[in-house]
Amino acid sequence: MAFIRIVEVGPRDGLQNESRAIALDTKVELIDRLAATGLKSIEAGAFVSPKWVPQMAGSGEVLTRIRKAPGVAYPVLVPNEKGLEAALAAGAQEIAVFGAASESFSRRNINCSIAESLDRFRPVAEQALAAGLKVRGYVSCVLGCPYEGEIDAGKVAEVAAALVSMGCYEVSLGDTIGVGTPARAKRMAQRVAQDVSADRLALHFHDTYGQAVANILACLETGVAVIDTSVAGLGGCPYAKGASGNVATEDVLYLLNGLGLETGVDLDKVARIGGWISDQLERPNGSKVGRALLAKAVA
Ligand code: HMG
Ligand code: MG
């Protein structure tokens, strides 16, 4: 049976966009509970400027306090050398650098051009690799930009290839504002796979227009086998107004289970965590599958 790896990004991409303060204990409990579901990769925080993204300010403490389950990776976002220094001090074993295929988004998100961002990431990746860390890469706005509209898939491929050439073991393709539709998403993935082999790509689709599950299904046909998801569909992006959360982990697991694809992740356990974190944050559960399973459990 084919295996699909799920990268849970709720504790980072999900929580970074919450406006209310979230207790450190809640963040730690969320990550520790997720680590008991079979997930093998859980993005645990971001070492970014607290002025830019206040919600990620405690990431060092989160990383030190989580249980660190054997066999589970806890990647963290790092935008520059200052972030790397802090991530290393907190014991990070894996980092992710995050670029974009849109110049305007790059400037709004990390305050530099695409070329400058790649120049900034190169020494970060080099130092992280030398310290024995794994480095993941992101490309944002692969199917559209909140400031520029449509984005050329050739540009996505160029940035993805640059990230691989500096040592990223995998590049995650972000539909940051969730505007993609299946045929375009598949064409984009096929175009990127001409320059970066599909087994080094991941899909990171937000679900603003409700197309993420369909887009994932279309892109699975290109051979991509890693999917970023967020429990209860938590999240958004502080520099992409109106963007909703990542596709819900529960929704993707339900899709993959139905296709007979193995993930090693227990859907019922994830659904219970989705209900719990939604209650904690006093927000509606963003996963249709999660809501259905939880309703069935109490019926
Ligand atoms: P800048 O203002 O150009 O940075 O921001 P700077 O180097 O000029 O420094 C300004 C201040 O920030 C200084 O402090 C630095 O010390 C501090 P001050 O002297 O003013 O007190 N600083 C830092 N503090 C903590 N950690 C650091 C750090 N670096 C500088 N690493 C910078 C540039 C990159 C720092 C800023 O723009 C930033 O932090 N941006 C992060 C934005 C972000 O986190 N966005 C969300 C994540 S991306 C995303 O969600 C998309 C994704 O999910 C994929 C998808 O969906 O497409 C990944
Ligand atoms: Mg995202």
Image (cartoon, rainbow, N blue to C red):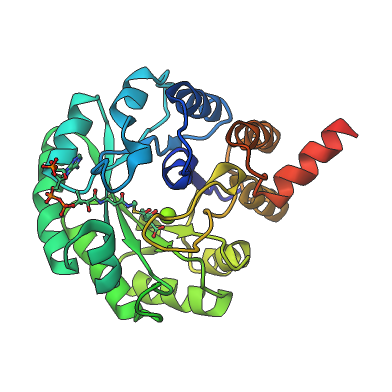
- Residue toward you, 7 or 2: 7
Please say whether residue 157 is visible from this viewpoint.
no
Residue 213 locus on image (x, y percent): 61, 61
Residue shown at 60%/64% (left/top)?
Answer: 217
Residue 210 locus on image (x, y percent): 63, 65
Residue shown at 15%/53% (left/top)?
Answer: 121
Left or right of 36 in this view: 250: right
Residue shown at 19%/64% (left/top)?
Answer: 162
Of all residues, the one furthest to the right in this rendering is 299
Residue 261 locus on image (x, y percent): 62, 50
Left or right of 71 in this view: 218: right
Identify the image quadrant of residue 195: bottom left
Residue 160 locus on image (x, y percent): 28, 64
Residue shown at 23%/65% (left/top)?
Answer: 107
Residue 237, relative to residue 219: is it above or below? above
Q: Quadrant of the C terminus?
A: top right
